[in-house]
Image (spheres, rainbow, N blue to C red):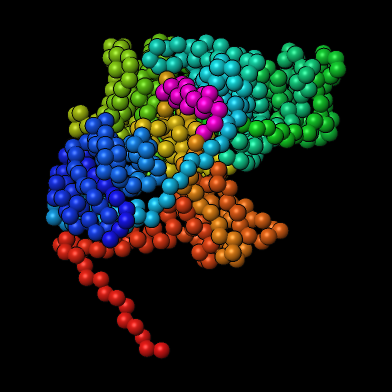
Amino acid sequence: MSEERIGVYVCHCGSNISDMVDVEHVSAWAGEDLAEDGVVVSRDYQFMCSSLGQELIEDDIKEKGLNRVVVAACSPHLHEETFRGACDRAGLNPFLCEMVSIREQVSWVHTDRDIATAKAKAMIAGGVERVILHEPLEPLIVPIHPATLVVGAGIAGIQAALEIADSGHHVYLVERDSSIGGHMAQFDKTFPTLDCSACILTPKMVSAGNHANITLMTWSEVEQVDGYVGNFTVTVRKRARYINEDVCTGCGICIEKCPKSIVDDEFEAGLGFRKAIYRSFPQAVPKYPVIDTENCIYFQRGKCKACQIFCPTQPNSIDFEQQDEVVQFEVGNIILATGFDLFDCRRIPQYGYGRLANVFTSMEFERLCNAAGPTEGKVVMRDGVTPPKSVGIIHCVGSRDKHYNEHCSVICCMQSLKFAHLVKERTGAEVYNFYIDMRTAFKDYDEFYQKILGEGVHFVRGKVAEVTDAARLPGEDDKLIVQVEDTFIGNQRRILLDMVVLSAGLEPRHDSAETGHTFGISCSSNGWFIEKHPKLDPVSTMTEGVFIAGACQGPKDIPASVVQGAAASARVLARINQGQLALEPVRASVIEELCSGCRICNTMCPYNAILFLEDRMVTEINPALCQGCGTCVAACPSGAITGTQFSNEQVMAQIEGLLMLDFEGTPVVRLEPELVPA
């Protein structure tokens, strides 16, 4: 008989578990049939995670002298900390608690009550066998460096940086473009209030650029991240601007005198021009220009230097010999706010973008409407002068489509309503919105929808099949024709238009997988960064010390991105103020005597926690960096890597417990292996 004193607690989880599992029977069975294994008390309760449920466990630990606890409830991912806390408050080492998931792994996946009940018994038996081998553990304490790295300076990254900087802590804000601001800097108006985007963004950009606690690093990229939560070492490459920032005044004469003009495919979405030395937009932060070496005449032909000749500063601000600079610094936490890419509308050829002149993307339309854009805010067709008399706006281009992206891009409906309003306001044209479903959740969004309805905008519910200029009927010449099924009237329609705007969906950054690898976090199957918990912890990741904010986690509008930036900074500030962090001691470790030095595990760790020591020819694991995922344990052919709380003995004991019952709930007769004569 076991010398351990184990308490088993089975949760009803309301009806989540008890509807499919006979919880009272399972609890009674554990108390009787597992007594030989050390179970001295077994209880069931409606909500074991409630305060009263936890007090039940605490009282038993104190009164019955329990030295092990097994809780059969929901996922350990949700409530392991809850029950470890209960053990800790009662004076029991929290790592002597084992959780068994009889909700996700039993009640939610079975339809036969008898089989579910038998499986719950088997899993509890496995938990009991396993918890006997648990050892008391102490958390790993690591100090937290007070500086923070924020990657990406769109609205989410700027908000996060300002929140931390305003609290008195230093922030390194790294942005790959030449200016901060992100996509929001390209927009004209924001929904539903129709605020000028630049008017509400620019003050924040200026604050971030001038803040004493923010080191702004634009035209820069993070190359490498080493270390672990509280103690990251970050290597950043600052690309050469070919501008001496110490003396440049940002007067713009160099831009004015540059003879090379090229199409601006980035900020102006291909509708405008910029020089080879340029500033993305007038309110750019920082104010310094950057030289595009691929188009600069001097870098291509070895002569010109007009920018340098006309630069009025002394000494001259133009430095053609400038080199990339590699900078290294220490931070305690990291916030990723790397944003999104827009869907490339050329991927849906039947909508005609790139082939039909007056089919525009949503970003092109944003630039058309912008007073600082290529048409100074005039909504005109591709010829640059003719205002349209009829405009069609197609929702969900590249979104909610199994051929491209199945997810909803969140912003398309409201963005398209905003476009409809701007067209009406500036041209008085007839406007058609082609939509699948109208999604106007959140504050004042539906009121905005009603306002647009009142402005006389036409709404056609149905997925557009084609945008063409192929006339089939009289009067269709020189027009764009939208072929669509109107599901309200149940008929196909051909609607003649002068201009079509494609409301492009949001996609993960094209290099999100590489970025995730650099920072040791994962992407979902569709490329968005994975949060720790989609509902309860949407800004944390599975890597301690790395947080995410904004559209890099999934499609978001501006208010949601700002909220996430603030939330991520709040999580970072809490850690900085603590000064140190207690890490869970469930980590992998290497038994040096067994390590063959094969290095198979070296490249498999998703958290870069494994080092190979050349002098001793063995592998070593950084316990602060390790997240206890077990990948290296499974990969090691020598069995030289073991996981705390997941040793071979513990796993085998759990399997023994699981196999003690058959599906009828009958104890399995254990056969001893036959002895083979020598």
For the residue pair 367 and 415, the one nearer the viewer reads as 415
**Which part of the image, by quadrant, shows the C terminus?**
bottom left
For the residue pair 523 and 621, the one nearer the viewer reads as 621
- Please give left or right for residue 515 compared with residue 549 in the image: right
Q: Is residue 438 above or below residue 671?
A: above
Magenta part of the protein: which range? 560-581
Q: Position of residue 203 (x, y in %)?
A: 56, 11
Q: Residue furthest bottom?
A: 678
**Which part of the image, by quadrant, shows the N terminus?**
bottom left
- Please give left or right for residue 672 compared with residue 301 in the image: left
Q: Position of residue 668 (x, y in %)?
A: 21, 67
Examine the image and state in which quarter residue 239 appears: top right
Residue at x 30%, y 45% (from the top left corner): 66
Examine the image and state in which quarter residue 487 appears: top left
For the residue pair 318 and 428, the one nearer the viewer reads as 318
Residue at x 49%, y 15% (from the top left corner): 197
Res 678 visible = yes
The question of residue 564 being in magenta is answered with yes
For the residue pair 324 and 480, the one nearer the viewer reads as 324
Q: Position of residue 464 (x, y in %)?
A: 33, 34
Q: Position of residue 381 (x, y in %)?
A: 48, 21
Q: Is residue 5 above or below residue 376?
A: below
Res 384 visible = no
Residue at x 57%, y 54% (from the top left corner): 603
- Please give left or right for residue 143 compared with residue 552 in the image: right
The question of residue 304 being in magenta is answered with no
Examine the image and state in which quarter residue 470 appears: top left
Q: Looking at the magenta stretch, what is its main secondary structure?
A: helix
Residue at x 81%, y 26% (from the top left corner): 319
Q: Is residue 475 above or below residue 545?
A: above
